[in-house]
Each structure stands twice: as structure tokens, then as C-alpha cells.
């Protein structure tokens, strides 16, 4: 019998596309989407859906039992910018949701877990260029502290309890189907929307702030690839570095100007600059390449083409 999958946080930026990708691959009825609120029509109409608060262990256990779930993808989280405003709520959501899923796996109620980490696990003392898998970390944001702690717990549950948990340190993710919410890398999505609707964008990060980024199709492909990989090949059970491209606001603006020559960018810097300044400029993902054959396909130019073409058709 084929496996049954639960996605928690299915209505968010990653969850929405992950749900569609998993439904396409394994069949709609095999993939249960859940979130604290309902999602867009395309998501709600494409297969089973449950309202679930990821911090509620009993509710999660009930859904897992009812649908006979084998695998959980835990995508619910409070992102970096919002977490600075609500530190305790962020810690509560980001950590307790993870413990709930890890404990279900420890109790053998589910077999496999995917949990996303982030470039936010790195901090101001981390070497910024081609940041290594293992290096100085010391995250200085609430979100980064929660992801760093989560990574330690994932590895611990794997080592002590044999839990099959797999994780990626996603860079900033760029997509057109669902907006990101509350992140520092969100500017790289907003800029495409504003380029089409207004022809101008006011950026909250400095012109020369370089951050690691990835197009959503690559992120989804990496996630499915990691989850399919033979467990024996996975040497890292905290979270894998994952990379595709890095660019600055100046560079993304220039790539948009190739398609929309009159597009203009200006800068109104806010508190998110300090968050971005604490993160790496670029990431070394050699371990992901070697252990499970990762290779990104989308660079900045390809991403800009996809974003502008798809948004033009939908906005
Ligand atoms: N994209 C996330 C954020 O900006 C980082 O994982 O918060």
C-alpha cells in the first residue's frame, strides 16, 4: 500500500506548492493538507484538508490516526521578521510544533518527518562567503535561535530514538503562487509584484545586501529528492546546507530592468536590515551534492523570467 502524507502549514508559501507537488506525485487522496486557516481555492479543492493548530499534540495525533499518516512535512513556522516582534509566540510555535511531530515519530505513530531549517541558523560571527555546513553559528534572531535549536533536536531524536527526520536549510525562497509572510527575504518576491503593478519598488534592505536565494521549483525538487533518498546516504540529520544563487537588491533590480526597462528601485531601510546583515552572503552545499545528488537549476535570470511571466498572467 502506498504511503499517506500530512502537510502541516499547507497554506503558506512553501506548503501550498509542496501540497500540489506531493498530490501530483502520490495522488490527491494520499496527501492531507492542514493549516490553522483555510488556503486558496486551488489548494482547498485539490484534496483532503484539516484545520490543525500545530502546537496541539492531541489534535495532531488524532488526525494522524484518522488518516493513517506515514509521513509528515511540518511547514508551519513564524518567520524571521515577525518573530522579532513576537519572540515568545515564535518560540512556542516553532519549537512545540517540532516536538509534537518528533514525538509522534518517536512513538512510531509516523515513519518519516520533513522539517525545514534556514540560513537563519547562521549568525554575525559566521564566515559569510560560501558558508560551510559546519562552522560558527551563534544565530542572533529569535527565528534563527529556534531553527538552530530545532536542528539540534532533530539530530538528537535521530541518534537516540532512531527517528527518520530530514531537513534542509532553505535560503530565501522566491515564488509567484503564494506570498511569503513575515520573512526578511520577502523583498525578493514583493519586488516582482511591484515591478508589474507599479513599475517601482521601495526596498527595505540596502542596495548591496547579498543573500542566498532559491526559486521555489528548486526548493520543492530538493525537498522531494531528500525525502526519497536512501536513509543510508544521509550523513547529516541536523539539516543540510542548500544553495542555488545569491544576489543583492541592485542585482535583482537590474535583472528586472532587462525585461521592464523603466522599472525603478529606491530604498527605505528598516529593522530587517540588521537581520539580513547577520546572515551569510552565499552557501556551500557540497554535502547535499555528494550525499543525495543535489544540483540547482534556476539562476537569477531564469527566476526573473519565470516570475514576470507567471505574475503577468495572474495579477
Ligand atoms: N526566508 C526566511 C526569512 O526571511 C528565512 O528562512 O525569514
Image (cartoon, rainbow, N blue to C red):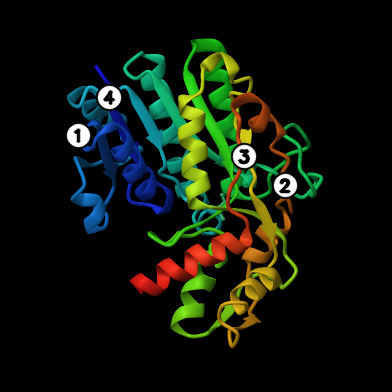
The quadrant the C terminus occupies is bottom left
The numbered dot on residue 29 is 1
Sequence-earlier tag: 4 or 3: 4
The residue lying at 71 percent from left, 45 percent from top is: 283
Instruction: Please state which of the two labelled residues, at mark 2 or mark 4, is closer to the viewer.
Output: 4
Asked whether disc 4 touches disc 3, contact meaning CB atoms under 8 Å apart, the reply is no
Picture residue at 56% right of the left edge, 80% below the top? 201
Instruction: Identify the residue position indicated by label 4 in the image.
Output: 69
Q: Against 127, is 62 above or below?
A: above
Q: Nearer the viewer, mark 3 or mark 2?
A: 3
| Residue at mark 2 to residue at mark 1: CA–CA distance | 41 Å
What residue is pinned by disc 2?
123
Residue 262 position, x and y percent, is 59, 88
Q: For the residues carrying marks 3 and 1, which lies nearer the camera in this image?
A: 3
The residue drawn where x is 63% and y is 50% is 141
Residue 116: image tag:
none
Is label 1 in a helix, a strand or a loop? helix
Using a 10 Å C-alpha cutoff, classify the residue at mark 4 as few (fewer than 14 neighbours), some (14 to 19) or many (20 or more). Answer: many
Label 2 vs label 4: CA separation? 36 Å
Q: Residues within 10 Å of mark 2 (few under 14, many from 20)?
A: many
Residue at 79%, 49% (x, y): give it.
Answer: 128
* Secondary structure under the numbered disc 4 in the rendered image: loop
Compared across the picture, whether 49 is left or right of 160 comes to: left
Which comes before the other along the chain, label 3 or label 2?
2
Q: CA distance from mark 3 to mark 2?
A: 25 Å
Q: Is residue 40 above or below residue 8?
A: below
Q: Quadrant of the N terminus?
A: top left
Q: Whole-percent x and y of residue 240? A: 62, 33
Contact check, label 3 and label 2, Cβ < 8 Å: no
Mark 2 vs 4, N-terminal side: 4
Amino acid at each position: 500500500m502506498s504511503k499517506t502524507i500530512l502537510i502541516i502549514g499547507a497554506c503558506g508559501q512553501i506548503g501550498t506548492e509542496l501540497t500540489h507537488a506531493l498530490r501530483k506525485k502520490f495522488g490527491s487522496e494520499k496527501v492531507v493538507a492542514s493549516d490553522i486557516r483555510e488556503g486558496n481555492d486551488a489548494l482547498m479543492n485539490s484534496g483532503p484538508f484539516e484545520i490543525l493548530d500545530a502546537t496541539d499534540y492531541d489534535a495532531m495525533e488524532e488526525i494522524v490516526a484518522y488518516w493513517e499518516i506515514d509521513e509528515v512535512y511540518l511547514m508551519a513556522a513564524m518567520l524571521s521578521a515577525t518573530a522579532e516582534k513576537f519572540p515568545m509566540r515564535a518560540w512556542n510555535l516553532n519549537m512545540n510544533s517540532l516536538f509534537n511531530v518528533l514525538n509522534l515519530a518517536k512513538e512510531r505513530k509516523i515513519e518519516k518527518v520533513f522539517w525545514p531549517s534556514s540560513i537563519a541558523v547562521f549568525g554575525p560571527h559566521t564566515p559569510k562567503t560560501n558558508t560551510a555546513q559546519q562552522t560558527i553559528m551563534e544565530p542572533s534572531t529569535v527565528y534563527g535561535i529556534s531553527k538552530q535549536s530545532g536542528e539540534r533536536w532533530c539530530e538528537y531524536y535521530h541518534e537516540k530514538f532512531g527517528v527518520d527526520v530530514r531537513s534542509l536549510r532553505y535560503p530565501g525562497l522566491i515564488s509567484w503562487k503564494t506570498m511569503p509572510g513575515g520573512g526578511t527575504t520577502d523583498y525578493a518576491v514583493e519586488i516582482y509584484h511591484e515591478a508589474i503593478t507599479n513599475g517601482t519598488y521601495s526596498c527595505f534592505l540596502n542596495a548591496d545586501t547579498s543573500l542566498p536565494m532559491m526559486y521555489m521549483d528548486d526548493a520543492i525538487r530538493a525537498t522531494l529528492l531528500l525525502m526519497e533518498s536512501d536513509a543510508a546516504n544521509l550523513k547529516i540529520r541536523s539539516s543540510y546546507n542548500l544553495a542555488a544563487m545569491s544576489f543583492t537588491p541592485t542585482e535583482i533590480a537590474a535583472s528586472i530592468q532587462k525585461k521592464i526597462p523603466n522599472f525603478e528601485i529606491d530604498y527605505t531601510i528598516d529593522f530587517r536590515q540588521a537581520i539580513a546583515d547577520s546572515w551569510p552572503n552565499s552557501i556551500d552545499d557540497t554535502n547535499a551534492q555528494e550525499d543525495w545528488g543535489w544540483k540547482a537549476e534556476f539562476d537569477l535570470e531564469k527566476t526573473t523570467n519565470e516570475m514576470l511571466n507567471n505574475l503577468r498572467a495572474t495579477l
